[in-house]
DNA sequence: GAGCCGTCTTTTTTT
DNA sequence: AAGACGGCTC
């Protein structure tokens, strides 16, 4: 608690030499948000209004004016990316002084740091491990199976979610209200308590615990709380609309000392209610923090007036909001574009063509790079149609936010080995890899180990040793288990030899050798080697194996930026970042959720259909609240666009394998006609209803029903079908003749080479599909150059 | 312990 | 429709 001394306050001289450059170029609202330093401040920052600029300038201002030392500022974000960005930008203003900001980070990383200092107050040791969701689920499964629960009827996953939600609301098992008593077959609370007990025994906590334990400590130990309250003279929070109850309490407790809390957020962009975020936190701010100053950032620097008008019109349909109107000095720009399609495939095909048009430069617009375009979908399964299509036409794309590196099986296995090396008593890690690679230790052997461990009340490593001594592990398994245990002991000694602080219950006697710094990388390689883990994948003949070996190499490489294995493990537990590859020019595909905080010159928003968007499930589960969150999602989507925003919907879509006819989303009706150009051919969509002339498309439900009639009318079908089945010919009339070896393009199967010709039938070897017979009329001659689209 | 077959599920996702 | 998962058999 003495890090005050390490601060390097900026000298008056430094200030004179560098007179607040961070204030340059701020608009009046931003400036007010930056300069209102005392008391609670709510910075209501609309999309694209320069909130990060204001937030970082505020930090710079606090430091530059000498209001606080770097270590007296608590600056909290949700994601590591946001924390990094903040650090980078503050560093840009202040240089090295940013290094002193020890309390800038995510809720979870700061909580972990606090908890390591005071772990004993909640019955943990400061060396506690942070469980990932895999471990969490495994633990819950064990508890349920011990209680003879039918996993079919009461899935562990469900209990895990319930417990998470409870933790989000800052309820310890004792605090779960009786209204929740019927959860999980009336036994939710009981299992929650059992789960927490197990965690304590394992000296572990899950993500929710990081926050919850902190809150518990603050509430039960006023002296500890006071210490931090005094320390944190200024508190700043980003994305306040995403905070859950636990985070809210955490903040309120910590900020109660100096009451200088600045929350930045946008109630209109609250889209994480389903995982515990409470929009209420931001809506209630002025009541929670009396005397609060509310500053609205409404000048938008991102989008055209049409885009802002459309977004504003849609979001105005929500009841629960503080109210903001974005405006811009920009004058011109394209209207939003709206188009209906026959089905999802056609939608994908059309978007693909549009992207290629934009790339070339079309309709007087400047050419766009692929980098500058993104497709934002409501649900990830919608991505598939686009991926298929883009693969076919050879359009480079990247999916943002897929499965994360550290969630991959091989990475988790390797991490479990590292965890064992650091703390051999980590039972969850032991369970994960004791039989990976196969060591002939099946269910039976593992049960024996469990039995011995439980009987002697020791971790599984020791239980295993006892079981061997007792001769209870039979056959091949015995020798292999012994080798495994010896390996763990050896690796643990090596970790200690590298200068680690021995754990209280270090299981292996050791003579501490002089630290050989940097060798944790060698050690990691050695562990993967000696355990046979690398070999396991070398011998694996499945197509994924080489990729997994690459990932393991990457994992070892990632160790380079850490001093030891412990530091690395902490990092991985808390930093689940997924920085996708950078350089190449590619279109981005992502969910609307993943798009928050990003912006692109051109945005495509497909799938605006009732049931899909707004999502039926969201409305079923959360009713009006759910619908409003969906509407905020629409708002987020539209406001990602700088210049061009294209919304589309399809009349038919395959849902869980069944074809369904779809209705355009109610959000389509909510778009202001004045700012939207309808691309759907007249008579099909644009001609329906009275609407579309300033007041929107008309929002009555009956009217939507009438649109449905049109979609299912013979006229719509005929037109769509005709358009669809007409092969696109080069210049329209003549079916060209093909020779063997010619490179051709097929609407459905993509590029290929003609292998043989039989009259008007061709046999084509497709690049992205298998070889097949196709009619010559359905393919076009393609340029030999790769990736070129021939129309 | 591995592989095969039938059944079930299917939003959004960070730490 | 497709992928995941569980249970069955060898």
Image (tube, coloured by chain):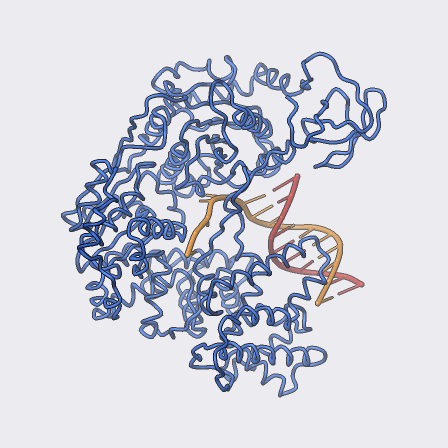
Chain colours: A blue, B orange, C red
User: Could you say which quadrant of the image residue A744 lies in?
Assistant: top right
Q: Quadrant of the C terminus of chain A?
A: top right
Give the x, y percent position of residue A125.
38, 75
Residue A388 spot, x, y in % from top left: 62, 36
Classify residue A240 as left or right of residue A492. Answer: left
Where in the figure is residue A202, as x and y percent of width and height? 45, 73
A273 left or right of A349 in image: left
- The residue furthest left is A291
Depth check: A387 or A139 in front? A387
Residue at the (79%, 22%) spot, across then down:
A738
**Residue A248, quarter of the rendered image:** bottom left
* Residue situated in front as seen by the camera: A421 or A211: A421
Image quadrant occupied by the N terminus of chain A: bottom left
Q: Is residue A246 visible?
A: no
Q: Give me the residue at 82% from left, 27% from top.
A: A740
Residue drawn at 70 percent across, 62 percent down: A538
Judged left or right of residue A155, residue A487 is: right
The residue lying toward the viewer, choosing from A81 and A4, is: A4
Residue A639 shows up from this direction: yes
Residue A721 location (% of width, % of height)? 63, 19
């Amino acid at each position: 608690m003495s890090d005050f001394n390490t601060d390097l306050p900026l000298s008056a001289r430094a200030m004179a030499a560098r007179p607040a450059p961070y204030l340059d170029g701020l608009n009046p609202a931003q400036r007010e948000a930056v300069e209102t330093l005392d008391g609670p401040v709510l910075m209501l920052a609309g999309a694209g209004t320069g909130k990060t600029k204001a937030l970082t300038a505020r930090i710079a201002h606090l430091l530059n004016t000498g209001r606080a030392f770097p270590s007296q500022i608590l600056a909290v974000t949700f994601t590591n990316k946001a924390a990094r960005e903040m650090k980078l930008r503050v560093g840009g203003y202040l240089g090295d002084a940013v290094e002193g900001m020890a309390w800038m980070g995510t809720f979870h990383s700061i909580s972990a740091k606090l908890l390591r200092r005071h772990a004993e107050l909640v019955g943990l040791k400061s060396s506690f491990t942070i469980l990932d969701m895999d471990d969490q689920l495994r633990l819950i499964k064990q508890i349920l199976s011990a209680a003879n629960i039918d996993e079919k009827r009461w899935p562990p996953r469900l209990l895990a979610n319930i417990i998470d939600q409870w933790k989000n609301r800052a309820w310890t098992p004792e605090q779960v209200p009786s209204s929740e008593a019927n959860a999980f077959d009336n036994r939710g609370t009981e299992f929650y308590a059992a789960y927490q007990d197990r965690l304590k025994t394992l000296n572990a906590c899950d993500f929710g615990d990081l926050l919850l334990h902190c809150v518990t400590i603050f509430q039960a130990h006023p002296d500890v709380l006071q210490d931090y309250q005094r320390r944190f003279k200024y508190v700043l929070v980003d994305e306040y609309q995403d905070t859950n109850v636990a985070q809210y309490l955490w903040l309120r407790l910590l900020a109660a000392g100096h009451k200088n809390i600045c929350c930045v957020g946008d109630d209109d962009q609250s889209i994480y209610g389903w995982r515990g975020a409470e929009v209420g936190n931001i809506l209630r701010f002025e009541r929670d923090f009396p005397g609060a100053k509310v500053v609205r950032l409404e000048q938008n620097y991102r989008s055209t007036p049409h885009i802002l008008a459309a977004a504003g019109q849609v979001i105005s349909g929500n009841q629960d909001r503080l109210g903001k109107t974005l405006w811009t000095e920009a004058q011109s720009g394209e209207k939003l574009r709206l188009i209906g399609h026959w089905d999802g495939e056609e939608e994908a095909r059309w978007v693909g063509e549009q992207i290629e048009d934009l790339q070339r430069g079309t309709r007087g617009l400047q050419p766009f790079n692929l980098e500058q375009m993104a497709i934002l979908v409501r649900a990830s399964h919608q991505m598939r149609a686009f991926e298929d299509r883009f693969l076919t036409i050879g359009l480079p794309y990247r999916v943002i936010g897929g499965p994360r590196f550290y969630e991959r099986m091989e990475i988790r296995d390797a991490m479990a080995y590292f965890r064992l090396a650091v703390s051999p008593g980590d039972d969850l890690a032991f369970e994960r890899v004791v039989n990976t690679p196969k060591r002939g230790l099946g269910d039976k052997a593992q049960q024996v180990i469990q039995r011995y461990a439980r009987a002697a009340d020791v971790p599984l490593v020791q239980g295993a040793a006892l079981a061997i001594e007792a001769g209870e592990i039979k056959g091949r398994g015995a020798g292999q288990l012994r080798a495994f245990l010896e390996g763990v002991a050896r690796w643990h000694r090596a970790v200690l030899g590298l200068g680690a602080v021995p754990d209280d219950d270090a299981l292996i006697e050791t003579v501490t050798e002089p630290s050989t710094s940097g060798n944790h990388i060698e050690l990691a390689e050695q562990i993967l080697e000696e355990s046979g883990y690398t070999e396991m994948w070398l011998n694996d003949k499945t197509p994924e194996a080489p990729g997994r070996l690459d990932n393991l190499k990457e994992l070892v490489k990632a160790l380079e930026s850490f001093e030891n294995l412990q530091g690395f493990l902490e990092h991985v537990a808390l930093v689940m970042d997924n920085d996708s590859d950078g350089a190449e020019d590619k279109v981005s595909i992502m969910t609307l959720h993943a798009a928050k905080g990003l912006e692109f010159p051109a945005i495509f928003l497909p799938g605006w259909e009732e049931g899909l968007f707004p999502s039926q499930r969201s409305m079923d589960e959360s009713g009006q609240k759910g619908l409003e969150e969906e509407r905020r999602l629409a708002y987020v989507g539209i406001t990602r666009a700088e210049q061009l925003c294209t919304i589309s919907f399809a009349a038919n879509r395959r849902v869980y394998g069944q074809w369904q006819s779809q209705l355009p989303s109610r959000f389509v009706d909510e778009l202001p006609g004045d700012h939207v150009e309808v691309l759907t051919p007249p008579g099909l969509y644009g001609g329906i209803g009275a609407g579309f002339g300033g007041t929107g498309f008309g929002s009555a439900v009956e009217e939507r029903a009438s649109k449905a009639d049109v979609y299912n009318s013979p006229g719509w079908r005929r037109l769509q079908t005709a358009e669809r089945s007409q092969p696109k010919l080069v210049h329209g009339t003549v079916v060209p003749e093909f020779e063997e070896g010619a490179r051709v393009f097929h609407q459905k199967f993509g590029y290929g080479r003609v292998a043989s010709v039989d009259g008007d039938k061709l046999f084509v070897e497709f690049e992205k599909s298998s070889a097949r017979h196709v009619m010559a009329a359905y393919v076009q001659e393609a340029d030999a150059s790769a990736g070129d689209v021939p129309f």
